[in-house]
Image: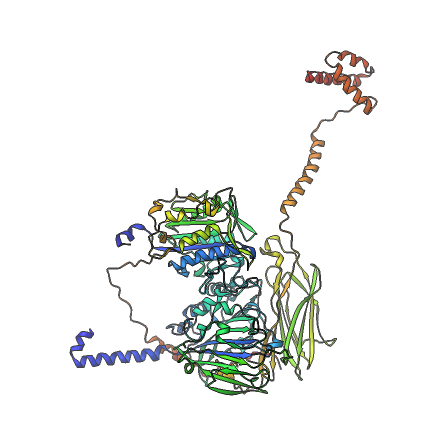
Amino acid sequence: TSPEEFFKSGHTNNWAVLVDTSRFWFNYRHVANVLSIYRSCKRLGIPDSRIILMVADDMACNPRNPRPATVFNNANNQINVYGDDVEVDYRGYEVTVENFIRVLTGRLPPSTPRSKRLLSDEHSNVLVYMTGHGGDGFLKFQDAEEISNVELADAFEQMWQKRRYHEVFFMIDTCQAESMFQKFYSPNILAVASSKVGEDSLSHHVDPSIGVYVIDRYTYYALEFLETVTPGSKKTMGQFLEVCPKYQCISTVAKRTDLFRRDVNKVLLTDFFGSVRNVELLPDSIHLQNATLHTHSEDSSDVKSDKPLSYAQQFPMPV
Amino acid sequence: MASDNANLPGGKITFLLFFALVNFSFTIGIHNDNFSEELYVKPFSSGHVMFHFQFTTVWNVSIDKPESFQHYHLFPKSLGDVLTTYKVKELHLSQTQGLWKHEKWGYPPEDAPPGDELWVWFQPHSGVDQTWADLVNALSGLFCASLNFMDSKSTVQPRWSFRPAGLASEFYSANSRFVRYSTLPREVVCTENLTPWKKLLPCGSKIGLASLLNSVKIYDGFYHSLGVHVRSVCQDTQCLTPATELKQTLTVVYDPTTNKNGKQDWSFQSMFDRTLQSQCPLADTRKIYVDVTTQETLPKFSLSPVPDFVLNQKRSGEERKIAVYQIGNHLSPSSLNLKAMYEEKLTFSNSSLPPVYANRFVTGYGLERGGVTCMIYNTMSSNTTVIFMETVPWFLRVYFSSLRIENDGKEIKPYKINFIPAKDRANPYQMELVFRLFANSVTKITYSFERAFLKWTEYPPDANHGFYVSSAVVSTVLPVASQYTATSQSVSLLEESFSDSSSSFFLRLHTETLLVSLPTPDFSMPYNVICLACTVVAIAFGSLHNLTTRDFTASDPSKRKGLVAKLKSFFKKEKESPENKPDSKEEEIPSQKDKDNSKSEEKDSKKKDGNSET
């Protein structure tokens, strides 16, 4: 983008919050879903420090996985979506509704490390992807609790009021997914769901060697589309929202564009899935202080003790 | 500026001299750390092979002075910042999956329990509990593990078992106020833990020994354990100034005979699916050691390429032969693929048992009570003192009176006991026993517990899996280094501890973890319960409501008609009601006033009936 476009758009950085809410081996496909989107985000440029990945159960090193440290989203096992360089921020029992809302709204305890915080500002485009088991108006977290669409809408409103996003792209792949974005009322949110209210989202295919479904239909076709996108691609969000027509997905893909101010056919896909690395040139020069070459010699003289130090006795009892 | 001076030869020389001086002082001033990468390979008689990677960074600054932790070179800054911010003096983190079989494999260089184990010694300061809570959160972000679950419910302060491994004064180490120990037996270890661990290495994972670490093969092994150990060590033999040592270890045990029909051959290519193509230029020591003590006896094997030389390691009664490879000598012309070729297939034989080993298991049945038994075996011909430490979660209520230590049926009185009972939802049970293990015997420690009821919100999402109890820790001192591979306390590298003149060897063992079921409610019951409850409420409430709000009128028992008469009158009423009301009235027996009233009421009701019918 040219400098004029850069300063006009108001978007300077990208974040992604990718959530898988399902536990147990038979929900392998939900982990494969979220890891596929994670892989696409990383490939298109969003670094690990800008991705909050929440995976509710471990499939890769699960004792039932015949190919440890791998998660495949295809029975042909072409791509190991788990990969060699993966950082999961919230794993296992940490994936709860409370933690998810806290991540979105930023109201985390002070001791939370940076890698677990969503440090977005008013120029951030945030991609939120959720997958799991859902119903009309709720999404189930780990078979123990639910998040309702009203709570989610309020969380996004809190984000808007605290200026924690510039634009949000909300993707959800569950049954009756449309219900999750029906209650949104904050501006600048573009949402797409894998099925309408009253419809179930279906999974794509089974891997006979594992015995479970490995990917859901919507994410499978979305991934097929994303694999053709490169960081410099000019593909638009409008094209992405048309992915997976009814004959492929069997459920109807629903979208919500009324809260989004721009025309989706003019928005680049990399605005949400890729990472903007723009450099701001300052015309004035900054003078740096002289580096501390002398402090080191001061330090080394302090530490010498007069008596020789000794190692602690590891077994404090008489032998 | 340079171009100006270049015209004058004098100016150019002074500029170069100045640059050289700055560079020189810069080098001495900053680079006071060194890094080594070593790999220790040990084949076991059971056919398994252990690969122990050790990456050691020693930085000549004191961890007691956090302001000296500037100018990071080889020591990772992310870890250094965490250590200084949270006033850490020593940190030991291990992330393990699998159980180390002491009976078959002897002792590993670093013993670790299944799951995650973290023990930290802090600098003396007040408010250590808060610092510990903040530290585990910071480490959970650094290592992508759920270490933030190590809260007060699972944290203990061991009194005798986990003394500092590095430099520390007597006064400091005897004070258990500054140590915290916690484990997460349920924690899974996968590539997401290996990734940040690899990022702490100076050479990363692209060159050097770390390039062998293929996650797909490592997590397919029998046992794997990641370790991060930070402690203070002596800078030199005089030991007047401390240095900080960071040891990153990865122990993997493979079974080369699976899918190979008993053939024991192993190589880098077959075990890691990679060969060693480079060495880390930042490392001072870059070596591979292979334990070839059993090379000439059964099972016979030969190594390719031929090792540079073979060391004879003597460690108080135990003699081992170590083949040493200097990595740099073997990288050209092609990469190093260390291979061992065995002459015969695997034959199963009784391996020699280690001096001390332990087993622990749950006893009892049902969901009300249970017991824990730990058997500690001493195969040496001498007695030894042992410290046994257990941490039991609060919901397994231990009966201290049931604790018994037995040896061959005879009860043993422990020399010292440290038992801190649990506080519900606050602290776990902490037990440390010091007692004597007699020669060539089995000592049995038993205690019983009662299972508590948890509140329904306290169950994890997969409550029917059960709850884990962390490993017990057995510490002792061995007089002989039989099957002992750990490094000595006073040295950092593996090669420095091959020849050790000490006569006692500190040993720490971890037992198995336990999986215990608690009385768990059926979480799918709410629907059924609601139906049942509503039915009961409807019947009881409905009946009561009827009883209290309906107006009852008394009827004359003599006027009560039998069933047949009732039916007759019903049919008569239907036939005659539009016409013969006075007739029906006359049929009734004339009576007293109240009966008149009731008669008139009956007449009214009949009229009403008649009206309603018409």
Front-most of residues A34 and B180: A34
Which residue is depicted at the point 77% across and 24% down? B554
So how many labels did they put on this image?
Answer: 0
**What's the colour scheme?**
rainbow
Query: Quadrant of the rendered structure where residue A304 is?
Result: bottom left
Q: Inspect this view and state whether residue B229 appears.
A: no
Q: Quadrant of the C terminus of chain B?
A: top right
Query: Quadrant of the rendered structure where residue B203 is?
Result: bottom left
Query: Quadrant of the rendered structure where residue B14 is?
Result: bottom left
Front-most of residues A286 and B100: B100
Front-most of residues A27 and B338: B338
In the depicted structure, whether residue B534 falls above or below residue B315: above
Q: Position of residue B507 (x, y in %)?
A: 58, 78
Q: Inspect this view and state whether residue B535 appears.
A: yes
In the depicted structure, whether residue B373 falls above or below residue B524: below
Q: Position of residue A160 (x, y in %)?
A: 40, 48
Which residue is depicted at the point 62% across and 61% down? B467
Q: Position of residue B179 (x, y in %)?
A: 54, 70
From the viewer's perspective, tell me whether residue B286 is left or right of residue B504: left
Front-most of residues A293 and B245: B245
Which residue is depicted at the point 17% across and 74% down? B4
From the viewer's perspective, tell me whether residue A127 is left or right of residue A28: left
Q: Quadrant of the N terminus of chain B?
A: bottom left
From the viewer's perspective, tell me whether residue B322 is left or right of residue A287: right
Q: Position of residue A4 (x, y in %)?
A: 26, 52
